[in-house]
Image: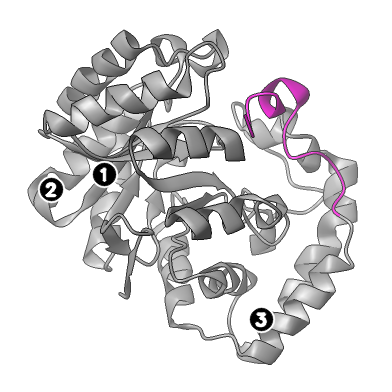
């Protein structure tokens, strides 16, 4: 698979990474541990070298699964994990105090069965802790050899600038897809200016852009799409099917799938963008990775841009409590 470098950091990864969260958290019951490990190892066999996790996924369980899965080929892959929540629990609130960052580092290293974290993200900006203190703490961890690169997630322009001035930010991880293009306004120009890579999570719109979710879909218990994300209400799903219908048209023209078009579109935006779609199925993993072999012409990219700009997306991507944590 093609390799990409995240900004000016020198951190080289596969063009598509694997978001591992859904194997343990957020999308219904956790995948059987053996199956989850087998899926991660299959991804590596297929060329994926970038695996994304966080202490908050589980909490803790997802890091353990990723650590066990990549242990046989640890030196050939890049592991990204995150700090930033009280006791690793997103429901308890934010905590990026320097002492907590150091604690998370040591605990994550143990769970991941490794001696260094390749990319360490602040999961959400903590307004109670000066960004200079957060970046300074990660800088010390890099000097100690426990961390290789610093990242941020869903951060705003001012926070990114402040952090980058203390310790260069290798990558920003935020939501970006054909139906969430907010980063194009301020974030992507800033990342280009500063030489920071972009790692879009939910590049398939939390599964919606695959075309497999309809107004009649029932979500499993524990699946955030069922009762947390406004965009996934039955009414909004019905209204947003225009997106999927359009993607289907393009996909049919090229004899590929809507998911592959959505990922190929992201890959075509910038050479330093590395999406991290997640899945629990090997067939979907193979489908997603097939997107790296699809080339969209300038005419096709213009056709997609013109069409999606005319489609109004119904429903907020986050409830207010979650939205208040982003863009700070």
| Whether residue 15 is situated above or below residue 96 in the rendered picture | below
The residue under the point 83% across, 60% down is 241
Compare marks 3 and 1 and give the one earlier in the sequence: 1
Mark 1 touches mark 2? (CB < 8 Å): yes
Secondary-structure class at tag 1:
strand
Residue 48 % position (x, y): 29, 62
Q: Name the residue under label 2.
A: 74
Give the quadrant of residue 212: bottom right
| Whether residue 217 is situated above or below residue 197 in the rendered picture | above
Range shown magenta: 313-328
Mark 3 touches mark 1? (CB < 8 Å): no
Is 119 colored magenta in this rendering? no
Left-right relation of 26 to 138: right
| Residue 156 makes an appearance in the image | no
For marks 3 and 2, give the one nearer the viewer: 2
Q: How far apart are marks 3 and 1 (CA)?
A: 32 Å
Q: Name the residue under label 3.
A: 251
Magenta segment, prevailing SS (helix, strand or loop): loop
């Amino acid at each position: 698979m093609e390799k990409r470098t995240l900004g000016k950091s020198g951190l080289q990864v596969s063009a598509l990474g694997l978001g591992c969260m859904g194997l343990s958290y957020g999308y219904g019951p956790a995948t059987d541990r053996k199956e989850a490990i087998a899926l991660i190892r299959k991804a590596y066999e297929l060329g994926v070298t970038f695996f994304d996790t966080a202490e908050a996924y589980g909490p803790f369980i997802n890091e353990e699964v990723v650590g066990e899965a990549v242990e046989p080929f640890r030196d050939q892959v890049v592991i990204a994990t995150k700090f930033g929540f009280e006791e690793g629990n997103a429901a308890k609130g934010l905590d990026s105090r320097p002492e907590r960052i150091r604690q998370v580092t040591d605990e994550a290293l143990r769970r991941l069965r490794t001696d260094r974290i390749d990319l360490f993200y602040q999961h959400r900006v903590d307004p109670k802790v000066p960004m200079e203190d957060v970046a300074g703490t990660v800088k010390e961890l890099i000097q100690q050899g426990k961390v290789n690169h610093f990242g941020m997630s869903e951060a705003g322009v001012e926070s990114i600038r402040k952090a980058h001035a203390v310790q260069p930010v290798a990558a920003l991880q935020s939501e970006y897809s054909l139906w969430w293009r907010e980063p194009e306004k301020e974030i992507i120009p800033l990342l280009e200016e500063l030489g920071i890579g972009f790692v879009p999570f939910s590049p398939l719109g939390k599964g919606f852009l695959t075309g497999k979710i309809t107004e009649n879909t029932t979500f499993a218990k524990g699946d955030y799409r069922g009762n947390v994300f406004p965009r996934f209400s039955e009414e909004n799903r019905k209204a947003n099917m225009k997106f999927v219908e359009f993607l289907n048209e393009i996909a049919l023209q090229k004899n590929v799938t809507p998911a592959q078009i959505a990922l190929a579109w992201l890959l075509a935006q910038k050479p330093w963008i590395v999406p991290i779609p997640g899945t629990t199925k090997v067939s979907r993993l193979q489908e997603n990775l097939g997107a790296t072999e699809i080339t969209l012409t300038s005419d096709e990219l213009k056709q997609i841009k013109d069409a999606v700009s005319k489609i109004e997306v119904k429903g907020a991507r986050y409830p207010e409590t979650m939205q208040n944590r982003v863009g700070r």
